[in-house]
């Protein structure tokens, strides 16, 4: 029954109207007739027609989204064409052109004024279009890393609920939202009874409370209590700092508490000036004198002479802002299509010069789809339905079969006859699917013959306890496929793997935590008689009491359940704990009834090292039983007290294979002079095995190349700085260790990329030069990052670095082209003032219109095309220092050489025509009119103009590479640039030959024999440029520094796994 029908509103018609986000306001969801914090959660569920376990159906959610509107405070701003055009008109460059146009019209030079007006329109049009594209890209980037919501929904046609991740805007009242540590609360919601586990939220932005607020499910009696006292509610925008919970959404959009604040702040400050003062303020804003940057103000030259204005235009790189915006916008779009979502565009440039990449292992360097390969129990053998004696020196190992679907909860479990031992050789690429190898490998068949299949009804008691711990100390869920596809899973990859293993042992969590259904339902769940228990050996179910979620600082998770037997006998509290072996050992005191002494710990650590050396991630599982009367006491216990005096159960070896792209990405890093580092929470042996396999570590690595987080944190800053090299692998790494690593890298004067996905990784992500968040990570980490990886892939980081280097080089290319062209034009215009006619007036080598033509049309399009250059093949062959700054000594040398060369060649042609062919008469008033006496000047001016324009087009092609010659580069890989050069070269001919345009507008004459010296100077330019680049290549070869470390041959052969960006 719809909410509105169930609880009809008593307010007037105006109050009934629901404001919609797409009509200027946003979703107002006053969906309850009572305040939700005052009522039990069951009543809130009933009022909203919600279901705590199944959530809303997809059709109902869609219907409510249409009724209430998107869950957002205000619609995202769309780029305004009028505002963009206004900014372009008020731009310094456009103002200069308008000034030139005003001077031309003021002196009644209608033709020049008309041409400049056309240039103004063209410049504003191109600039507005470019800025519009860039603003659209920036607007799209605002949603990158935005919080998402994990909701429970029921798909149409299915009776089983599914857990899915949706955009926050799609959350509606009545949705069941799952919250965990690190999430951003998507909307105001009521905590549900029985689904709250140590939940704490940071609400400082809303209440000013500096400490996180502990939440509860019990209602609050006071109806009008402050927001901060409504501890049974969670509020939109707050951050979950601890625990987990399931909440039902009560308010969305502007009806949330933060929405009410947004409404109060909606009226923005306005200019209080009135009359002429208000008009003057608007005028200053339009001209860029107010509310703008100082750079824009001081770049406006105050000149009234057309020639001086043209000279001033030549000084400014007119296309700079447009090219930078377009280049970065295009790069961010390209990276987004390759799974790297850029939240801040300056991160693209920062990526170019990074010297270190500090990456997590799980899911980034590895696939992240984990499967349990081994269980190890410290007993002498396997025996059905009884406890085997303790034996830590040998133990009993079990192997799990895995098919093509890692989430499929069925598969054989076999008892190994061989003792787990350290392997001298590492084979991480062994196919975990036994069925694919048993027919081809004789040794595999022999080993299989000595293994025994385990039946779920005949588990050894210690293995059964392991299965219980793997299943219950776990919050992952498995979902059946709707069609014939693969199974789906939701939760941490490690917990998913353990849950699948528990299902294979017949101990799936749904069967353990639900009371026994009716006979008919039992038969539908599993074959067998109706009086048969769902789980062998258990006639009852478990009810969760409390959970202490995984914490990266202690590297473990614990949970407690109350066991409710069907016959009421043997009720107890089951406490379970799992985590890193070293941290779990701190909390264990026994194995079965034997003490866990140092000798037994040593035996177990040998097995841990053996499993880790096989590339397996090793976890320790343990548990304890308490009397049922202690249930309330357990719920109130502090974590430190609860996690004590556990019994060690065994080890789980989880396999997470390296991504096939990782070795090639690491090889690219090494070739580019970038040091890849692995910072992981895994065991040192596991981390070392993976690092060796993908090339981060060499086979003969040094003693300081691998450290644990404890070892690294134990060093002082001076001791860290004294290390010859920082460690390449840091195992058992805590979030604080990542921060110390970033600081250590910075103290060495280097930059770094840092990846992270947890809440506690946020400080390291912010402190790193480029923080990279994981798409599957917490909302807090994604918002702290500057780039978010939607595929969590290490190779995507390297692609982003490659693109960053490409953008950096493209910026340098078009800056060199623009500035050297401006320098050449300034040389022609300034030195040309030395040519005096009979009246003592300077004779311009270029007319003002010609100068403006060159600076806008001949400079702008090629510069834009250079900004869109494809990524160079050798982008990863240069060291990071080559990308630290654009304005280097080499850049200045190139700028001076090309600028003086192009300007000198153009002036020389002007002089050759005027004094070499003609007698050197400069006539009179040749800057204004076309008379017979001015013919030599017009011919020389046309020759200078043609020489400058055509050489600039060839120069644009030369700027594709700073050291390779024109014949060594691929001119066809940037067809836009090639077409710009060809078209603008051809555009010279209409300017020179069409009457009125040539002699009245550009003040040039039609060329005849002069083309010979034009092409002669082009050959001089090409010869000088090729010789200059050849000298640069010789110098670079002689002074080249070998990389600090070369990639191994093995990884070099795998570089092709990364497609060039």
Image (spheres, rainbow, N blue to C red):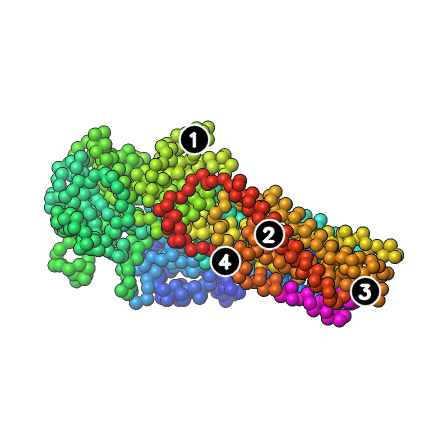
Q: Are marks 3 and 4 in contact (CB under 8 Å)?
A: no
Earlier in the chain: of badge 1 and badge 4, it is 4
CA gap, disc 2 to disc 4? 35 Å
CA gap, disc 3 to disc 4? 53 Å
Name the spot of residue 989 as percent of width and height, x first.
Answer: 69, 67
Q: List the residue tagged with mark 2.
A: 1026
Q: Secondary structure at mark 3?
A: helix
Image vertical order of residue 2 relative to residue 752, above or below:
below
Q: Can you tell which of label 1 and label 4 is closer to the viewer?
A: 1
Q: List the residue tagged with mark 1.
A: 723
The residue drawn where x is 44% and y is 45% is 671
Q: List the residue tagged with mark 4.
A: 333
Q: Can you tell which of label 2 and label 3 is closer to the viewer?
A: 2
Q: Quadrant of the N terminus?
A: bottom left
Q: List the residue tagged with mark 3.
A: 935
* Range of magenta residues: 983-1004
CA gap, disc 3 to disc 1? 76 Å
Earlier in the chain: of badge 2 and badge 3, it is 3
Image vertical order of residue 800 relative to residue 1011, above or below:
above
């Amino acid at each position: 029954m719809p909410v509105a029908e169930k609880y009809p509103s008593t307010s007037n018609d105006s109050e009934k109207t629901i404001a919609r986000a797409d009509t200027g306001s946003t979703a107002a969801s006053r969906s309850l007739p009572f305040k939700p914090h005052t009522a039990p959660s069951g009543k809130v569920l009933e009022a909203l027609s919600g279901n705590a376990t199944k959530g809303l159906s997809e059709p109902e959610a869609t219907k409510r989204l249409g009724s209430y509107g998107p869950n957002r405070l205000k619609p995202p701003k769309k780029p305004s064409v009028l505002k963009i055009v206004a900014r372009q008109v008020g731009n310094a460059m456009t103002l200069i052109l308008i000034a030139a146009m005003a001077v031309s019209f003021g002196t009644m030079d209608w033709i020049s004024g008309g041409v400049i007006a056309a240039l103004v329109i063209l410049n504003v049009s191109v600039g507005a279009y470019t800025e519009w594209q860039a603003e659209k890209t920036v607007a799209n980037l605002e949603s990158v890393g935005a919080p998402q919501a994990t909701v429970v929904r029921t798909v149409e046609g299915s009776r089983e609920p599914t857990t899915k991740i949706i955009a926050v805007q799609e959350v509606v009242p009545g949705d069941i939202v799952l919250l965990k540590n690190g999430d951003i609360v998507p909307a105001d919601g009521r905590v549900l009874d029985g689904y709250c586990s140590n939940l704490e939220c940071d609400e400082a932005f809303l209440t000013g409370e500096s400490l996180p607020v502990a939440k509860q499910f019990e209602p609050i009696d006071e109806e009008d209590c402050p927001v901060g006292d409504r501890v049974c509610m969670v509020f939109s925008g707050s951050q979950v700092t601890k625990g987990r919970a399931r909440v039902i959404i009560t308010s969305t959009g502007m009806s949330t508490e933060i929405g009410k604040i947004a409404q109060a702040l909606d009226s923005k400050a306005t200019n209080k000036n009135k009359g002429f003062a208000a008009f003057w303020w608007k005028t200053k804003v339009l001209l860029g004198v107010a509310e703008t940057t100082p750079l824009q103000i001081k770049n406006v030259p105050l000149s009234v002479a057309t020639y001086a204005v043209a000279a001033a235009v030549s000084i400014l790189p007119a296309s700079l802002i447009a090219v930078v915006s377009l280049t970065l916008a295009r790069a961010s779009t390209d990276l987004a299509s390759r799974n790297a979502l850029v939240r801040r565009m300056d991160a693209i440039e920062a990526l170019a010069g990074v010297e270190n990449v500090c990456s997590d292992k799980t899911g980034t360097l590895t696939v992240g789809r984990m499967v349990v390969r081994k269980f190890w129990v410290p007993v002498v053998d396997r025996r059905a339905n009884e406890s085997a004696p303790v034996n830590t020196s040998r133990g009993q190992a079990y192997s799990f079969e895995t098919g093509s679907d890692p989430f499929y909860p069925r598969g054989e479990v076999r008892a190994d006859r061989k003792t787990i031992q350290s392997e001298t050789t590492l084979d991480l690429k062994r196919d975990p699917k036994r069925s694919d190898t048993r027919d081809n490998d004789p040794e595999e068949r022999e080993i299989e013959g000595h293994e025994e299949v385990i039946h779920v009804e005949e588990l050894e008691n210690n293995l059964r306890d392991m299965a219980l711990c793997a299943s219950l100390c776990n919050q992952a869920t498995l979902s059946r496929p709707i069609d014939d596809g693969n199974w789906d899973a939701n939760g941490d990859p490690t917990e998913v793997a353990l849950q699948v293993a528990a299902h294979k042992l017949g101990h799936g969590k749904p069967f353990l935590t639900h009371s026994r259904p009716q006979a008919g339902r039992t038969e539908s769940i599993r074959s067998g008689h109706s009086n048969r228990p769902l789980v062998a050996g258990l006639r009852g179910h478990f009810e969760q009491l409390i959970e202490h979620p995984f914490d990266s600082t202690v590297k473990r998770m614990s949970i407690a359940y109350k066991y409710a037997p069907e016959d009421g006998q043997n009720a107890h509290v089951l406490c379970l704990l799992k985590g890193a072996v070293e941290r779990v050992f701190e909390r264990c005191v026994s194995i079965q009834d034997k003490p866990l002494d140092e000798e037994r710990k040593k035996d177990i650590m040998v097995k841990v090292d053996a499993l880790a050396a096989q590339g397996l991630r090793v976890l320790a599982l343990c548990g304890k039983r308490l009397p049922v009367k202690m249930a309330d006491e357990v719920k109130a216990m502090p974590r430190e007290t609860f996690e004590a005096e556990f019994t060690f159960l065994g080890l789980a070896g989880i396999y997470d294979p390296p991504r096939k792209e990782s070795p090639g990405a690491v090889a690219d890093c090494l070739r580019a002079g970038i040091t890849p580092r692995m910072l992981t929470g895994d065991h040192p042996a596991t981390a070392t095995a993976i690092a060796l396999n993908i090339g981060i570590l060499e086979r003969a690595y040094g003693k300081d190349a691998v450290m644990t987080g404890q070892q690294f944190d134990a060093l002082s800053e001076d001791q860290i700085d004294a290390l010859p090299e920082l460690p390449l692998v840091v195992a058992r790494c805590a979030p604080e260790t990542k921060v110390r690593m970033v600081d250590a890298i910075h103290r060495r004067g280097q930059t770094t990329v840092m990846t992270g996905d947890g809440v506690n990784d946020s400080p390291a992500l912010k402190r790193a030069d480029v923080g990279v968040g994981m798409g599957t990570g917490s909302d807090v980490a994604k918002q702290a990052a500057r780039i978010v990886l939607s595929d969590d892939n290490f190779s995507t980081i390297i692609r982003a670095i490659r693109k960053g280097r490409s953008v950096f080089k493209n910026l340098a290319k078009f800056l060199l082209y623009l500035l050297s062209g401006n320098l050449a034009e300034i040389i022609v215009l300034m030195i040309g003032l030395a040519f005096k006619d009979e009246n003592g007036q300077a004779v311009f080598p270029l007319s003002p219109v010609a100068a403006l033509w060159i600076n806008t049309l001949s400079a702008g399009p090629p510069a834009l095309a250079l900004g869109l250059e494809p990524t160079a093949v050798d982008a990863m062959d240069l060291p990071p220092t080559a990308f630290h700054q654009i304005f280097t000594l080499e850049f200045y040398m190139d700028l001076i050489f090309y600028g003086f060369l192009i300007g000198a060649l153009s002036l020389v042609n002007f002089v050759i025509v005027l004094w070499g062919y003609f007698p050197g008469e400069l006539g009179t008033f040749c800057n204004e009119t076309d008379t017979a006496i001015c013919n030599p000047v017009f011919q020389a001016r046309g020759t200078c103009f043609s020489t400058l324009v055509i050489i600039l087009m060839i120069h644009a092609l030369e700027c594709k590479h700073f050291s390779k010659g024109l014949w060594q580069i691929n001119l066809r890989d940037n067809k836009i640039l090639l077409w710009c050069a060809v078209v603008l070269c051809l555009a010279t001919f209409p300017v020179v030959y069409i009457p009125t345009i040539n002699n009245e507008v550009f003040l040039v004459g039609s060329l005849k024999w002069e083309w010979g010296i034009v092409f002669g100077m082009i050959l001089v330019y090409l010869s000088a440029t090729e010789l200059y680049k050849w000298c640069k290549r010789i110098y670079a070869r002689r002074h080249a520094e070998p990389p600090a470390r070369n990639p191994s041959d093995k990884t070099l052969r795998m570089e092709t796994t990364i497609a060039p960006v």
